[in-house]
Amino acid sequence: MGPITLLSAVGPVWAAFLSPELASRMQFGWTISVHIIFASLSIGLAPFIIYFTWKDVRTNEQRYARLRSFWVKVFAAGFVMGTVTGIPMSFQFGTNFPQFAEVAGELIGGPLAFEAKMAFFLEAVFLGVLLYGRDRVENRTYVISSVLVGFGAWLSGFWILIVNAWMQTPRGYEMVTRNGMEVAKLTDPFAAFLTPRMPWMYVHMMNASVISVALLVAGVSAYIVWKKPDTEAWNTALKLAVVLLIVSAPFQAVHGDAYGRHVEDTQPQKFAAMEAHYETGQADLHLLAFPKSPGALTDPRSENLVTVSLPAVGSFLASGGDFDAEVIGLNEYEENPPVALVFWSFRFMVGLGFLFIGLALWGGYLTYRGRLSDSTRYLKAMIAASPLGYAALLTGWYVTEIGRQPWVIQDELRTSEAVSSTLTGAEATLTLVGFVVIYVGLVLTALYVLKWLVREELQALGVRESNEGRWHGPIPGVSDDD
Amino acid sequence: MTDSLLPVDAYLVESLPEVWFGAVLFALGMYVVLDGFDFGIGMLYATRTDEHERETFLSAFGPVWDANEVWLVAFGTMLLAAFPRVYSRLLADNYLLAIGVVLSLVFRGLGPELREQRDDERWKRYADYAFIGGSVFAPLLFGMLAGRWLFGGATLPVVLTGVGLVAVSVVTGAAFLAAKTEPVLASELRTYGIGATLAYLGGVVVLLGTVVLTDAGGAADTVLSLPVAAVVALSIAVGLCGSVLARRGQYRAWLASALALPTLLTILVAILLYPTIYPPTGLLVREAVVSPLALNLVTVLGFPVLVLVLWYFKFLYGVFSGPIEGEGYGG
């Protein structure tokens, strides 16, 4: 077999590689999906950690020490995962989207550097103290460390979202030629950092993190309470998580509605994709949508959907009060984002959001009746709901990011122009596969770590491993250490 | 509104681009020094089979490695903020190396974290492989990336830069551990440390010799200059002094001199780069830097924070100073 035959045999394999652009987008989307779970875990857990640490130091009650120690371990595991997945992210602008990094460097580099210097260091340094320094620093310093770790996590989100919000609604720059390339030059830092999108995004994202973690804490607590109902610590945690959910879940819906109007104002194309609204004109609001055929999954047009809709309410919401308002349709644009992904992601997120409100109200009612930990049905529902916050959070991101396509910087730079020109399909595809394999391992590991921590906790509470199902009555031969 | 606060058309000080060149290299140096000893600990970890010793090693860097690693992100983002073209070209031109670095760091970070989650021999062994492998490959590939930055495509200098970073990491790792562990273990560690010092110094001489002979990246003239000779001579002096201190059992002094080696290495990198910032393309610092307003802004907002960060590090290392106790640091 000569070299030519060999080449022609390899040819089809070579052709099977994705294009550098598609592979890079998938790689970025995949790595940020995993990263965002851990990043938002830090953000959402921060209030819990601060509260438990403060209560522990102040009251010296066993239950707070127990909760602090458990959730700090989860936080630490999440932070390590967040760091190891965050460092690739900070490189990917350069490795996969160098044209973007170069065009936008002057605008995004500052906030990203501030994120590292103001927030990431704060979090990493004081997490070291929080994890290993209990008997090495004073109580007050210890509590302050937990506050600084939490503050670092929330500040991190602030700087990152400044960058992302700028990509959605870019301002404060002008295009100039530097080293033979058209790049954005910073002209007004206030405009560039405080874009119209920034406050919307920050509130929505931080609250989404709080909801996700409240559901996770509620789920873990519900599981432990289900296994051992009389544990004071976990009943406390469950109640706390439910209270947090009662506040955060309805707020997200109200805020999300107003946020949608803002998107219609600033990114009409994305808004149209969210509603699969093709013809410019009056828009209905699809409360629920189901595909009539499998084809409607990939091409959701209203004639192919069974919908529960409010006529003209889409116009009403988009315009803030006018039922006849014209909403621009997707047909007006030359190139649209993958509409199906945006449309279904949006429905998925909103649907889950309403489910969370339902769970919150149910939990509120049970708390009011003093039956929160007695309702096996509610405990099971919360256990089942524990990963759903993250599902909503991720699909929300898909709406935001995929909905902006074909632009990486809205109306300024196309994603296709941002991708590395030296990158080959083979390199991009193979590293994509590498990232997928390694990050799947990472996510599985994180889940195992959580599982082991829960099992360890149950053992410490005296629940025997063989004990399937819910335990009723006192557990024999176990000291009451809670 | 902003015009009155910050100059828009001129740098705050005339030499601000050079200051930022220095600041970016400073962050790089902090990373090479601090995460360097973490890598060294990871490599020396491979020489231990005793469970207690392994846990001592992990305790030594447990509270600080995460914070140390942030210097890499600080370096990357500062490079992006001040010299976006260098950032994008460096990473795009060296795609596989860059991805290799980040994946190595994934394994290095994950290993110890996973290890402690489960009391199972096989599990721990795999976690240890991840830790050791990541600790070897991260500095090797990062060094090679630096080599590509300095010398372009010339293979031998690039590989030697990677190996040099591995060796210097072993030196600092050994010195750091020796200063934090019991005398018996420390005296074993110094053997590795001294060996690595000699390997590192030899490697630097061979590397620079190769660069002169082959004129890799057009750096031959720079290598033959006085500043380079001074840094090399100083490195040799510091390395030899350190080895003597190590033999005498003065481990804290040894640590101080060992940390000087990667510091000098970073200075060497700065000398080899300047006045260009991406020698293979001949791009100058002044050409690659962002516009005055952007640079002024990151200076005014960023430099005070950098000072604060150094203070945090002082605090962190203060809290966890002194030898490691039997069980490591308390939770």
Image (cartoon, rainbow, N blue to C red):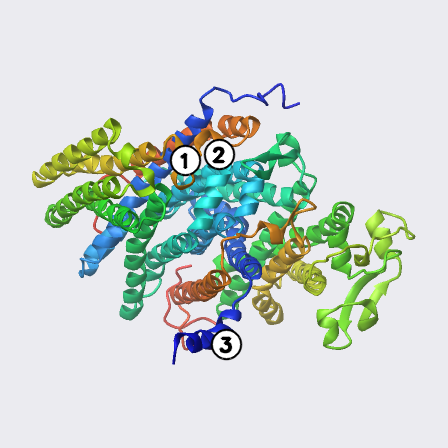
Identify the residue under disc 3: A469
Q: Nearer the viewer, mark 3 or mark 2?
A: 2
- Crowd rating for badge 2 (residues with CA inside 10 Å; few <14, some 14–19, many 20+): many
Please tell me whether mark 1 sits on a helix, a strand or a loop: strand
Q: Amino acid at mark 1?
A: Ile
Please tell me whether mark 2 sits on a helix, a strand or a loop: helix
Asked if marks 1 and 2 fall on the same chain, the answer is yes
Asked if marks 3 and 2 fall on the same chain, the answer is no
> CA–CA distance between discs 3 and 2?
65 Å
Residue B307, placed above or below residue A360:
above
Whether residue A395 sits left or right of residue B290 in the image: it is right
Whether residue A426 sits left or right of residue A264 in the image: it is left
Whether residue A153 sits left or right of residue B233 in the image: it is right
Residue A62, placed above or below residue A119:
below
User: x, y (%) of residue A251?
Assistant: 70, 50
Q: Nearer the viewer, residue A77 or B246?
A: B246
Which subunit holds the residue at mark 3? A
Which subunit holds the residue at mark 1? B
- Crowd rating for badge 3 (residues with CA inside 10 Å; few <14, some 14–19, many 20+): few
CB within 8 Å, label 1 to label 2: yes
